[in-house]
Image: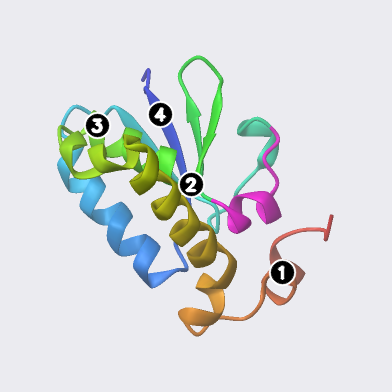
Amino acid sequence: MNYKLTFLYDGGCPLCLKETNFLKTKDTKKFIEFVDINDNYIPENFKNISFIQAMANLHGILDNGEIIFGVDVLAYSYELVGLGWIYFPTKLPIISDFVRFLYKYWAKYRLKLTGRDNLEKICESKCNIQ
């Protein structure tokens, strides 16, 4: 199948999983390949994005091979499922900066905020620390 986006997500994160499950229900045209990085993730199959990198920031791989990050992955996902208007404000300069700031904060502290172990502890069973 030719996907327009490969969406790498942390299926161990309850909020990430909720967002991803919502997108899956809306992706009726199957434009998005959803990849749970906690489920036998092999970086070589996904542009060598390591488990640590994927855990630290949301990653998406476009059909042309370009890698996008964070809010851009969400905005494009919503666009693909016909709900692009939800993320339209992220294209406005002042709002974009604020949303990106919030996302960076979320990405940095999401493990702690969702009651999970830190990245090093999670990596003990998932990867070689890089």
Secondary structure of the residue carrying tag 1 is helix
**Residue type, mark 4 in image:** Leu
Local secondary structure at mark 3: helix
Amino acid under label 2?
Gly
Labels 2 and 4: the sequence-earlier one: 4
Which mark sits nearer the N-terminus, 3 or 1?
3
Q: In this figure, which residue is indicated by the disc labeled 2?
A: 70
- Closer to us: mark 2 or mark 1? 2
Report x, y in % for residue 95: 34, 47
Q: Residue 128's image quarter?
A: bottom right
Image quarter of residue 30: top left
Q: CA distance from mark 3 to mark 4?
A: 11 Å
Q: Which residue is mark 3?
A: 79
Please state which amino acid type lies under the numbered disc 1.
Ser
Residue located at (38% from left, 71% from top):
14
Reading the image, the residue beneath label 4 is 5
Circle 1 residues within 10 Å: few <14, some 14–19, many ≥20: few
Residue drawn 18% across and 27% down?
29
Nearer-N-terminus badge (1/4): 4
Badge 3 crowding class, 10 Å Cα cut-off, few under 14, some 14 to 19, many 20 or more, is: some
Q: x%, y% of residue 15?
A: 35, 68
Which corner quadrant of the image does residue 93 belong to?
A: top left
Q: Magenta segment, which residues? A: 48-57
